[in-house]
Image: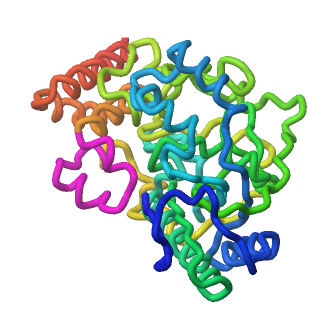
């Protein structure tokens, strides 16, 4: 997160920001142009109001579909009230940045049980910092423009990208840069391979028209989910989602779900890979190009990394957030789902005495799967 004050600002409460000498519509147009120059594929503006989305979010929490993501419930009030994160917030500038990596052979990797499938968003550099850095640069352009047009204008802006309790998807829809797919991800006519980011601001900018859904009767994303986590259109139960199981869940992966995970060791893209709109995806920003051969890595090679190698090889990657223990847990499950080979069995046996009980349990499960496959 980044909070930016103009050098003329005296307060963070800008409920009565003066706008003398400023054409809000012209400023909004410039903001969109500057955003494009910074590499964003689309910029839109919404009111700082998510009240229409709160009931659905509350219902999701009440049903327990957030799993162990306690922070979702803990910060529910902050998500529902943008002014709690930025006093006097009036407008939200929503940005979309594409990440679809060059040479991401998704279908081929998923079809090869000896390879590790890593969600395409995580193949390159960590998006949190990259998106916020660009939004901060956009914020500086806004600040410079206003300092020139109206010296002394007090306003505040705060930058986010999956870094605070913000209803990012809702703002993207309200700002007209996306719609919500039946898999709950945001979609545009260029698909869903993008990151979102926001600038909360006390400026009163004209809001864009909200986006309209263009999914029609298509249900391919629902049918593609390997664990049936999309329990209804626009409803995902995180407890069943492979991304949740391999990234957010800290403990043991439930036994019935392990065989369904296949070779997915960090996240899952199946719903996106089936979405017809992703046929129109463009190659994304070079910051998110696949690094270190992660788009075509063998499971046994990744399983051999020790903790130090894990940290070194994944420096600057979002994958580091799960830590080495869960990394081994996930790969052990994938190895158990692969066709048994001597190489896989040797790799698993080498981890059979791992200090972590979590790792040992998943390795034992994988070895039992190999033994069962040979009978």
Residue stretch rendered in magenta on the structure = 302-324
Residue at 46% x, 46% y is 164
296 in relation to 76, above or below = below
153 in relation to 213, above or below = below
Residue at 66% x, 24% y is 56
Spot occupied by residue 280 in the image (x, y as percentages of width and height): 79, 57
164 in relation to 293, above or below = above
Spot occupied by residue 222 in the image (x, y as percentages of width and height): 71, 26
Spot occupied by residue 238 in the image (x, y as percentages of width and height): 52, 24
Of residues 185 and 13, which is closer to you in this image?
Answer: 13
Residue at 47% x, 36% y is 264
Residue 114, by quadrant, is top left
Residue 184, by quadrant, is top right
* Viewport quadrant of the N terminus: bottom left
In terms of secondary structure, what is the magenta stretch mainly?
A: helix
Q: Is residue 305 magenta?
A: yes
Q: Is residue 230 magenta?
A: no
Residue at 74% x, 46% y is 173
Q: Is 326 placed left or right of 192 in the picture?
A: left
Res. 278 in view: no
Q: Is 341 placed left or right of 154 in the picture?
A: left
């Amino acid at each position: 997160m980044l909070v930016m004050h103009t050098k003329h600002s005296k307060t963070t409460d800008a409920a009565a920001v003066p706008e003398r000498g400023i054409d809000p519509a012209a400023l909004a147009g410039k903001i969109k142009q500057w955003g494009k120059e910074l590499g964003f594929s689309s910029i839109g503006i919404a009111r700082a109001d998510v009240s229409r989305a709160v009931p659905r979010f509350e219902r999701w929490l009440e049903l327990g579909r957030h799993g162990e993501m306690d922070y979702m419930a803990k910060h529910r009030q902050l998500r529902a009230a943008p002014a709690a994160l930025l006093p006097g917030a009036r407008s939200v500038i929503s940005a979309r940045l594409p990440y679809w990596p060059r040479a991401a052979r998704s279908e081929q990797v998923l079809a090869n049980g000896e390879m590790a499938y890593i969600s395409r968003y995580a193949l390159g550099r960590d998006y949190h910092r990259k998106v916020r850095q660009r939004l901060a640069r956009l914020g500086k352009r806004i600040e410079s423009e206003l300092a020139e047009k109206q010296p002394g204008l007090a306003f505040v802006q705060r930058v986010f990208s999956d870094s605070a309790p913000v209803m990012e998807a809702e703002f993207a829809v309200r700002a007209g840069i996306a719609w919500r797919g039946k898999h709950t991800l945001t979609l545009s006519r260029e698909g869903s391979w993008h990151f979102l980011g926001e600038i909360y601001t006390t400026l009163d900018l004209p809001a864009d028209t909200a986006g309209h859904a263009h999914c029609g009767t298509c249900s391919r994303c629902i049918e593609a989910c390997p664990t049936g986590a999309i329990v209804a259109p626009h409803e995902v139960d995180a407890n069943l989602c492979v991304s949740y199981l391999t990234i957010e869940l800290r403990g043991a992966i439930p036994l019935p779900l392990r065989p369904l995970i296949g070779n997915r060791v960090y996240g899952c893209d199946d719903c996106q890979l089936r979405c017809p709109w992703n046929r129109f995806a463009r190659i994304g920003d070079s910051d998110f190009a696949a690094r270190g051969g992660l788009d075509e890595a063998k499971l046994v090679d990744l399983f051999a990394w020790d903790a130090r190698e894990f940290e070194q090889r994944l420096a600057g990657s979002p994958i580091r957030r799960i830590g080495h223990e869960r990394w081994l847990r996930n790969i052990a499950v994938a190895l158990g789902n692969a066709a048994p080979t001597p190489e896989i069995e040797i790799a698993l046996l080498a981890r059979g005495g791992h200090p972590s009980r979590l790792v040992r349990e998943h390795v034992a499960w994988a070895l039992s799967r190999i033994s069962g496959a040979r009978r």
